[in-house]
Image (cartoon, helix red, strand yellow):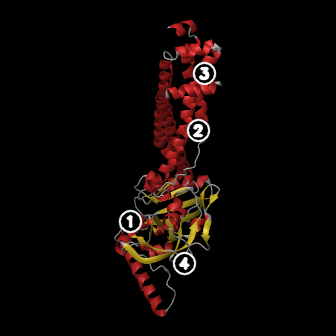
Amino acid sequence: MNLLSIVWKSIRQRSLASSLTALSVALGVALMIAVLVINGVVGRIFSQSGSGYDLVVGAQGGSELQLVLSSIYRIGKPYDNLPWRFYEELQDYAGVDQVIPLCFGDTTSEEEGSFPIIGTLPRFFGTNYAPGRSFGIKKGGEILKGTWDAVIGSEVARVNGWDMGSTFKMVHGGVQDHVHDEEFTVTGVLAPTGTPNDRTVYIHLRGFFMLDDHAKPASEAIERNAALFGENIEELRIQYADLLKKEEAAKKSGQHVHHHDGIPDIQKEVTALLVLTKAPTASIFLTSKLKEGVIAQAVNPVFVMQQLMQNLVGNVRYALMVLTGLIIVVSGIGIFVSIYNSMSDRKREIAIMRALGASRQQVFSIILLESVVLTVGGGLLGLLLGHGLVFAAAPIVTARSGLLINPMHFETIELWILPALLAMAIVIGILPGQTAYRTDVAKALYD
């Protein structure tokens, strides 16, 4: 009979105690795996999703974190909107390569997942959402060509069963009893990105502005533009009235109206602007420039999320890691106590093995191997339980937070868990093994 068979027989004789000690190790490892995997996935999402853009620009007044979370990760609500005029002027700033407007606030219905709906321009899909990672079109041709066209993320398509030609209506501001009459048609489905884009519906900015309550009332818009840009309110009112007269005259004569969405620019607002600059120095200059005014603020999304991960999420992760580490250590102590306490009951068993020819080293190895089997076996079970926990929690996390968790994700640090458990098992087994090694055969047989 080899050593492993002897160890397995010994464990089976104390099956309840052995199972409980191994299970305690498994639970500690499972918790550690869950913390590592979920933290790793979330960290990658937060570090990559917004890194395709140099700056995110939004209204002053809210926090930088609020701006990034709402604009890039679709979490929470933005502080305020920006006038359309600011968007047009921003495109002419020195060093600015491209500005992409985003308008949001509406969602799909609760029965359709309450997914966020964003009004934007087709060029949004021509930019990288992360370095070296561009949008892929799973189905569809030309993106957002028509006023009532929509492009949906892969998760939206999966949850709702939507495909090319599917239609839907928008819920205004997430208020379920305020549904817009206009119907949008899916003309494109995005390939999975592993980012909040998978859980987002995109429509053309033109269609967004044509919906009821999506344009600011003229009087409020004029007052706000006058206050923000420091202009005479009466002059703006006159300009607005002249514009309406010209458009009315153009309609009567059959000429093309300048505002093809039917909304004067002064009444339009955008929620956020994604900015690509020509050089890193341009980002710094623009951020400082906007701080001098009272209209907008610009933030680097990667920098903001790194601060969040380091200062808050990182600390929580370390706290959980320490806690789960302590659980594993306590489990190891439990294995030590279980084996050590059993030594008094096993002295006769050890003496018989010695009498049958087993050497002191073999007896020591049996006790040490028993510690290894219980600890490493519990660790392997913990690895399976941990990934099973992540697999079960992934859809719940996605539904509650909108973050897409890959249940098959693996962290490289997991490779160190089993070697660490092996080292702990050896330390645990040394003292009981020495006790077995020093067992007096004659005394144990005749006591």
Question: Dot 4 surroundings within 10 Å: few (below 14), some, or many (20 or more)?
Answer: some
The mark lying in front, picked from 3 and 2, is: 3
User: Image height check: is 317 above or below 144?
Assistant: above
Q: Position of residue 243 (x, y in %)?
A: 43, 81
How far apart are the two marked residues, 2 and 1, measured between alpha carbons? 41 Å
Q: Visible in this render: residue 30? A: yes
- Looking at the rendering, which quadrant does residue 276 occupy? bottom right
Secondary structure type for disc 3: helix
The residue identified by callout 4 is 146
How far apart are the two marked residues, 1 and 4, measured between alpha carbons? 24 Å
Residue at 46% over, 30% down:
16
The residue identified by callout 1 is 174
Q: Position of residue 277 (x, y in %)?
A: 59, 58
Amino acid under disc 4:
Gly
The mark lying in front, picked from 3 and 4, is: 3
Quadrant where the image shows the N terminus: top right
Amino acid under disc 1:
Gly
Depth check: give the residue in front, 416 or 438. Answer: 438
Q: Which mark is residue 341?
A: none
